[in-house]
Image (cartoon, rainbow, N blue to C red):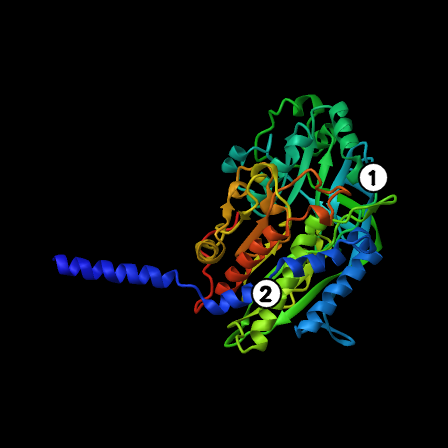
Amino acid sequence: MRNFTLIFLACFVSATVWSQKKDETAVKYAKTVTKKDLKKHLTVIASDEMEGRDTGSPGQKKAAKYIADHFKALGLLPPVKTAEGKSYFQKFDLVKSKWKDVSIATKKGSKTTYLTDVYALGSINAKVKKSYRVVYMGDGNKANYEKVKVKGKPVAFFIDGVRELRKKRSIAQNAGASQIFMIVGTNQKKYDEVLKYLSYYVKRWTRGELKSKKDKFIVMLSPKTAANLFKTTQEQFIKKETKIGTKSVKFKLTAEQEVKTGVSSENVLGFLEGGDKKKEVLVITAHYDHIGKRGDEIYNGADDDGSGTVTVLELAEAFAKAKKEGKTPLRSILFMTVSGEEKGLLGSSYYTDFDPIFSLKNTVANLNIDMVGRIDDRYKDNPDYVYVIGSDKLSSELHNLNEEANKQYTNIKLDYKYNDEKDPNRFYYRSDHYNFAKNNIPIIFYFNGTHADYHKPTDTIEKIHFGKMQKIGRLVFHTAWKIANRENRLKVDKVNK
């Protein structure tokens, strides 16, 4: 028994040592991610010449050219098909829209007045004309949907104010409602107050967004308008005595927006083709746009997200060197710096929702790097940390690989503070990885936290901690190396929320 135990322990220790053995090839190429090169690239990307890299601006396009030239010099392939041939640029247009009219008419010929009785939020493809009979859902609370099934049906419910808008919209969407009508307040005064608060989204041109593939809008009703649809008086209706599940009369909704082309922008893509498993693709991203200029002040965005952008450039160089020296990863890697993040994750949304250059089904993971060059107040005495967000949301294996890579090679503090679903910052939903996550592609978001210079002209290169960036860059490299070279594809073993 004792001898068997000793043998077992010896085997266990041997296996443990073996599992923690460093891959010296990986170490060799990870070391090419250096403070010197990170600073060299960031000195250009975050320079005044780039004028803050606002989406569609000349500065943003200069930054795009710099990135594409770097990819070309490394020998990465241009993967985007165009009429002129292959390109490193995935171009997309942003459109501006403005609500022109929204009205409701019943069979009796009555028609509402825009803004006084009804308005809408969201985007449509110019014009909507559609008939509805909506299901009344009272206060729109979750318990009401347990009483009445509304999957595939339009619903109407009360909201007390703007603070309830998102929450009750999500409840209705999760219940499968096909269209949402919100009854705003219990009197015209409250309705008018909410309209005034939302007037920026209702009465002005949007700042620029991707052209809607399908109509995504919600309709806001005055209590009087809603009462008419349910064949009752406003006084009776606001007492909320109408039975949950009651259907309205049939009515026609007409909604119209003015649409015009805004700016054009581009994602920059460099492709490294893999070996035996080359059809499977790992995507490594950062956004290279920032918020541009305000008057004569330039918002250089050295940390946000110049730091992530130049880390991607260094990772591309590391993998390109490995390939040139005969160490081609099993899987392909797409290095992608995206634009339009500051406008609402638009560049990554264009890639995933409109034009995925490589099949999302064959996309094994996304590693996203957004702000990794600064130190927040929580770690002011210890720069060797990174906030890891989303690593365990879809794939336990991905989470474990990142932990393993850190223990074996970089040994920095991995902080999961912002990975908590209850964290009010909701960073999981606020950078480009989310457009991959919503498609059930495992992701990791690497982040240093916010700081006093976030979205200010003082986010400049002198404040960047390049030693920290080097360590995080090497961690991302080792995690990417493991993903790209493991025998089996990462398993998706969790449900996206």
> Could you tell me residue 192's position as x and y percent?
78, 28
Up the image or down, 239 lies above or below 296; here it is above
Tell me if 19 is positioned left or right of 443 in this view: left
Q: Which residue is mark 1?
A: 203
Q: Nearer the viewer, residue 179 or 314?
A: 314
Labels 1, 2: front one:
2
Residue 191 lies in quadrant: top right
For label 2, count other residues whose C-alpha is less than 10 Å away and answer few (under 14), some (14-19) or many (20+). some
Q: Which residue is mark 2?
A: 32
> Could you tell me residue 410's position as x and y percent?
50, 55
Question: In the image, what residue type sits under mark 1?
Answer: Lys
Up the image or down, 261 lies above or below 456; here it is below
Q: Nearer the viewer, residue 454 or 261?
A: 454
Q: Earlier in the sequence, mark 1 or mark 2?
A: 2
Q: Tell me the quadrant of the picture where the N terminus can be found.
A: bottom left
Q: Are marks 1 and 2 in contact (CB under 8 Å)?
A: no
Q: Nearer the viewer, residue 226 or 197?
A: 197
Disc assigned to residue 87? none
Tell me if 52 is positioned left or right of 374 in this view: right
State the residue at coordinates (68%, 49%). 303
State the residue at coordinates (68%, 35%). 182
Question: In the image, what residue type sits under mark 2?
Answer: Thr
> Could you tell me residue 68's position as x and y percent?
73, 67
Hey, which residue is sitting farthest left in the picture? 1
